[in-house]
Image (cartoon, rainbow, N blue to C red):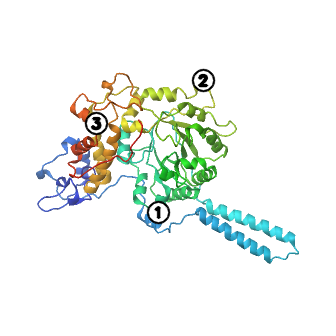
Amino acid sequence: AWRLRGYCDFGVMCRLGSCHINMSTGQNLRKTADECKSDASKDDDNNTETEASQPKVQLAIGHQNDIKNVISRDTMVKLRKSTYPFVCKRHFEVAKEKQKQKQKEDARVKEMNEEAPKAVDADREHLTATEAKSVGDATTPALPLKERKLIDFRNKVYIAPLTTVGNLPFRRIMKQFGADITCGEMALADQLLQGKASEWALVKRHPSEDVFGVQIAAGHADQYTRIAEVLTNEEGFEIDFVDMNLGCPIDLVCEKGAGASLMLREKKLRGSVEGLTKVLNCPVTIKMRTGWDEKKNFAHNLVPNIQKWGIEGIGAFMIHGRSRLQRYSRLADWDYIAQVASSQSSDYPKIPVIGNGDIFSYNDYEETILKRVGEGGDTDNMLLPTAMLGRGALIKPWLPTEIKERRHWDISATERLDMLKDFVRYGLEHYGSDQQGVNNTRRFLLEWLSFLHRYVPVGMLEVLPQQMNHRPPQNMCGRNDLETLMLSKNCADWIKISEMLLGPVPEDFQFVPKHKANSY
């Protein structure tokens, strides 16, 4: 923050305070605009200055935060106090209104003269029409129409939403290695509507993310619609597409009717898609799995059903080649993904399909995706030549470069350490350089290292390329000490790497990965 913006908000609490604090007076210094520009153009190795050359206090620039999609304090307060002026009403509120209107109708019918049945029938039809109109007005926000943006996903490298590890500093790393499209972590609609700051932090966007999406998980149509209202009404929000999560296998999410369980409820799903597309001025993508159980896949039926609804604004279907019960075990079924891509009817506008699962090298991309795109001249095949990366990007962040350059990159341990240095720098910029910011950066670094250690250097492989489901041997030694340390499966060794970048940890410090993957 000091190097980029000329001022550190954390002052004496900053772990790097010696760079910007006058040790004799305790004053938190500021740089002028000219000094910030000159420092930003220097290399990191030349940024270390002696105390005598510390900047003088002159006309200072303020704190410049370039992060986008930061929700306003006023909106947060309204969400927390349930005073936000939503147009869309909750489903239980609509049900109560229906019940009240029905009671009024019954009471009015009883008061009518039984000798005039025609008048009663006419009044009943009038009341029913009025009820339907009022309920429709309550669930469909009357917001001004806007021109919908379009996104071309073809021939792009798309980093899938990754819970916990797909944070903003990580996405900046992926942009450095050539990713074209990024998406924020899965955000729960009920938490967003309660004004949880930790959940709204998941929609933040860095300026380097030129095509950016937000993924939302909800179990009710009104929750999706209300979130769309907030995203549309909030000034300064820049979102290129909104992704509906129909693939999360976590029990806590599915028990709320969200994630993969929403695939089972087409009525709720249709209301959700309609609510989002009517409010948003950006495309809506739908990410789903093959089904609930791999023995009874039904995505090939669900996709054409959604197509037949005729809802404008759906940008793409994204199919993860595993069922909900599979989670991440066994290989992704790309033959079934191709079947889903060819399942749409020619009687309605077709929607592109993007496949996802087990892309770990440029060979995988060419053999699993490019080979199936328009296979055999099939005009019904809507599969796009898009490389959607999940765990492959966590284990090999340089995978976008490999795909675009069609090569196996034997990246050195030193280059990987430099990558981690960039991540730590981005983390301290984003989370802060005080103790809490250092703790958060260390935590996300360790979560990422729990995936990074699975990578086996190209120069050590007998057969190329490495496969996602291949488990490296125990106690594998690298070509140097640093590479051996990065190959370790021991959490204590991951902590050592974090200490190289963020300083020592407390004596009682322990780390257990949040995501204990049962498969490779």
Residue visible at 44% across and 56% down?
Answer: 236
The nearer-to-camera label among 1 and 3 is: 3
Q: In this view, does 478 lie to the left or right of 321?
A: left
Q: Earlier in the sequence, mark 1 or mark 2?
A: 1
Residue visible at 83% across and 71% down?
Answer: 120
Q: Distance between the residues labelled 1 and 3?
A: 41 Å
| Pick the front one: 174 or 477 | 477
Q: Is residue 451 left or right of residue 86?
A: left
Looking at the rendered structure, the kind of residue marked 2 is: Gly
Q: Name the secondary structure under disc 2.
A: helix
Looking at the rendered structure, the kind of residue marked 3 is: Ser
Residue extending farthest to the right is 115
Q: Earlier in the sequence, mark 2 or mark 3?
A: 2
Could you say where residue 160 lies in the image, as x and y percent from the top left? 45, 41
Residue receiving disc 3: 488
Q: Measured along the vertical axis of the image, is residue 344 above or below residue 427?
A: above
Could you say where residue 414 lies in the image, as x and y percent from the top left? 25, 34
Could you say where residue 94 lies in the image, as x and y percent from the top left? 63, 64
Q: Residues within 10 Å of mark 3 (few under 14, many from 20)?
A: many
Q: Residues within 10 Å of mark 2 (few under 14, many from 20)?
A: few
Residue visible at 25% across and 33% down?
Answer: 484
| Pick the front one: 1 or 276 | 276
The nearer-to-camera label among 2 and 3 is: 3
Q: Which of marks 1 and 3 is nearer the N terminus?
A: 1
Task: Mark yes or no: residue 255 visible.
Answer: yes
Looking at the rendered structure, the kind of residue marked 1 is: Gln
Q: How far apart are marks 2 and 3 (CA)?
A: 45 Å
Q: Is residue 436 left or right of residue 247?
A: left
Q: Distance between the residues labelled 1 and 2?
A: 51 Å
**Residue contact between numbered discs 1 and 2, judged by CB atoms under 8 Å:** no
Residue receiving disc 1: 194
Residue receiving disc 2: 376
